[in-house]
Image (tube, helix red, strand yellow):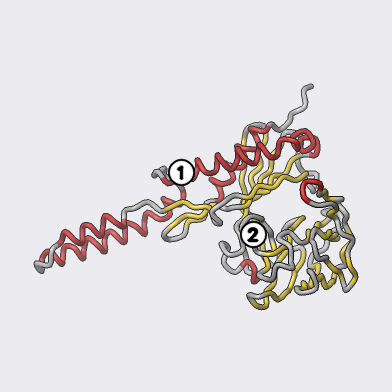
Amino acid sequence: MIQERATGRDVILAVAENMRSSLEPLVTKTIAPSLYQVYLHNADYERLRTLFGELEAEAKELLERELARLNRGAKTPGGRLLSPLRAWRRGRKDKGAAEAEEAGGGGAGGRTGGGGDRRAPRFVSAEGRWFIRFQEDPNGALEPGDVQVVSEFAQQAAAGYGSGAPTHRISTTRRLGRSTSQRETADAATAYARIAYKDDSGQREFWVVKDEIVIGRDAPDVWVDLRLETSLDVSREHARLRRSPESGAFRIKDLSKLGTTVNGKPLPPSLEGSGEGERDRDCWTDLPDRARIGLAGIVFLDFERTAKP
């Protein structure tokens, strides 16, 4: 019996399928998520890991092509949702134009205005660029050949997410060439942990709803889950938290230049070397269910585990 395995093509197509399932229509535009987390069975992960750079590049290129196709006027769920609003607007414009023409006020201007409202909504990436991560399946739920893609919006795109309000993630699983998608609601009731903190933007809180998150400074070229507005002392990718699905317990590792502390105790740095010789030793430390995490001694995060396994 030949064992199924995920191909690079499967991965790329799964990312594009997830994007199409995740479009969020607003009023003047439709937003596509910027972050795509790709989960693979450990056998597929190990086999494809040397190709992740190529897969990422091709997936990003395909996402750009999909946006271009959508912006050329292809009908989408977002367009169908917006069509009643555009029809209502056209009705208002047409009525105004008719009244103006009857009053001798020149209906042509009204018709021109109405034509402006018939423009299709714009389709854009939430952050104007794409972030694609690859990870082994942490829950042991995927079979060889399965590809699961989970997408989400940046904090500022999902209004209020950084303040603990509900947000949505779309999960797409591609199995034997067929895909299924489901929407996951993430809020305080479903979160694994809560992080309260204060940065330059004020007092905030963040709900941990994934098995691994990245914490770091706001920067245009790096995706972080918990994005801090603070000084350059905090690294763009400063620390990572990882949850064990079996026990529900968390671990933390330091990826910074100026250090991370837990309850005042410095963590061993996970990175060693510099430049092209830099490597991650994957050095994790157990995180208590309640802990105060310090980043470079200037930003402090109050971590609290809120869910049991």
Q: Disc 2 residue type? A: Thr
| Residue located 65% across and 34% down the image | 10
- Residue at the top extreme? 1
| Residue located 49% across and 52% down the image | 124
| Residue located 78% across and 44% down the image | 136
Q: SS for tag 2?
A: strand
Q: Disc 1 residue type? A: Ala
Percent x, y of residue 221: 63, 55
Percent x, y of residue 53: 68, 40
| Side (left or right) of 185 relative to 95 | right
**Residue 236, image quadrant:** bottom right
Percent x, y of residue 242: 80, 57
Q: Where's the N terminus, which quadrant? A: top right
Percent x, y of residue 201: 63, 75
Tell me which numbered mark, 2 or 1, is placed earlier along the sequence: 1
Question: Which residue is under mark 1?
Answer: 68
Q: Which mark is residue 287?
A: none
Q: Nearer the viewer, residue 205 or 99?
A: 205
Q: Nearer the viewer, residue 84 or 230?
A: 230
| Side (left or right) of 71 relative to 48 | left
Number of other residues with Cα within 10 Å of mark 2, as a class: few under 14, some 14 to 19, many 20 or more? some
Q: Nearer the viewer, mark 2 or mark 1?
A: 1
| Residue located 81% across and 70% down the image | 293
**Residue 27, image quadrant:** bottom left
Examine the rendered structure and indicate whether residue 303 appears above or below residue 17: below
Q: Where's the C terminus, which quadrant? A: bottom right
Number of other residues with Cα within 10 Å of mark 1, as a class: few under 14, some 14 to 19, many 20 or more? some
Q: Nearer the viewer, residue 298 or 283?
A: 298
Question: Which residue is under mark 2?
Answer: 185
